[in-house]
Structures are given as C-alpha cells and as structure tokens.
Image (cartoon, rainbow, N blue to C red):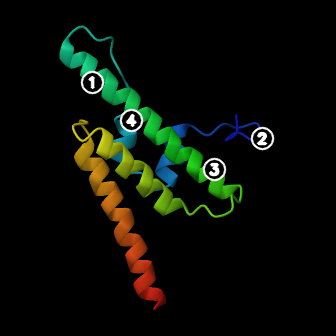
Amino acid sequence: MMLKGGGRTWSHLAQVLLRMGVPFNLVAAKAGVRRPVSAGAWQDLRDHVELDCLLLSVAKLGWLVAQGAEGLRLEPAIIGLVEGFLRRRPEHSLADQLRAYADRMQRQIADSYSRAA
C-alpha cells in the first residue's frame, strides 16, 4: 500500500526492484515456488522465502530513501542487508549472485568517490 500512494495504479514489487538496479536473475528467482515434497524441495522453499524477505527489505529501503529518511544512504544500506544475509546464509542457492550484487554496489560507491576527488 505504501508503494501505491494515492494513485490508482500499482507497481509490482519486481518492477520496483528492477528500477532500483537489483539484478534480473535475483528478481526472476522470486517468481515461483512449488509445494515441497522432498528435503531438497523444502530447502528450495526456504531459499525462496528468504530471498523474498531480503528483496522486500531492499524495496523498503528504497521507499524510505525516496520519502526523505534522514541519515539513510541507499547503497550502503543495501550492502549491509545483503552482507548480513550472506553471513547468516552463506549456503543460499543464490549466494554467488547476491555477492556479485553487493560487490557491484561497493564498486559503484568507490567509483563515485574517485570521480568526486
């Protein structure tokens, strides 16, 4: 509801995440989930739900920044979320892609400091 605001149109979470620069493969991974019937399927479900929570948190950070939350910088906050997630769940099925996303954001921050200097 917060993303909708006062308008009559809705933005799908995937659209918001893609516009925020979240890699397509991470957003696409959240699309579907099946009823688990094996131990491996339960692990897939856990990975799916955890990724959903992480991506929703990333979108919430973007919303907070867009609303003018003081002292909150989007990229470092997202890096903190992803790094914390990876410390807790290094065996997540998309850990490599999450690591690449955090690394890319860190490079962007470093590049912006280099250009400013």
Front residue of 42 and 19: 42
Which quadrant of the figure has residue 6? top right
Counting from the top left corner in percent of width and height, residue 47 is at: 31, 29
The quarter of the rendered structure image containing the N terminus is top right
Q: Are marks 1 and 2 in contact (CB under 8 Å)?
A: no
In this figure, which residue is indicated by the disc labeled 2? 7
Kindly identify the amino acid type of the residue bearing the numbered disc 1.
Asp
User: Which mark is drawn over residue 44?
Assistant: 1
Q: Give the residue drawn at x 24%, y 7%.
A: 37
First in sequence: mark 1 vs mark 2: 2
Task: Left or right? Give the position of 8 relative to 114.
Answer: right
Q: Does 6 appear above or below 47?
A: below
Number of the front mark, 4 or 2: 4
Q: Are marks 2 and 3 in contact (CB under 8 Å)?
A: no
Seen from this angle, which residue lies furthest top? 37
Q: Secondary structure at mark 4?
A: helix
Counting from the top left corner in percent of width and height, residue 36 is at: 28, 12
How far separated are the C-alphas under marks 3 and 1?
29 Å
Q: Residues within 10 Å of mark 1 (few under 14, many from 20)?
A: some
First in sequence: mark 3 vs mark 1: 1
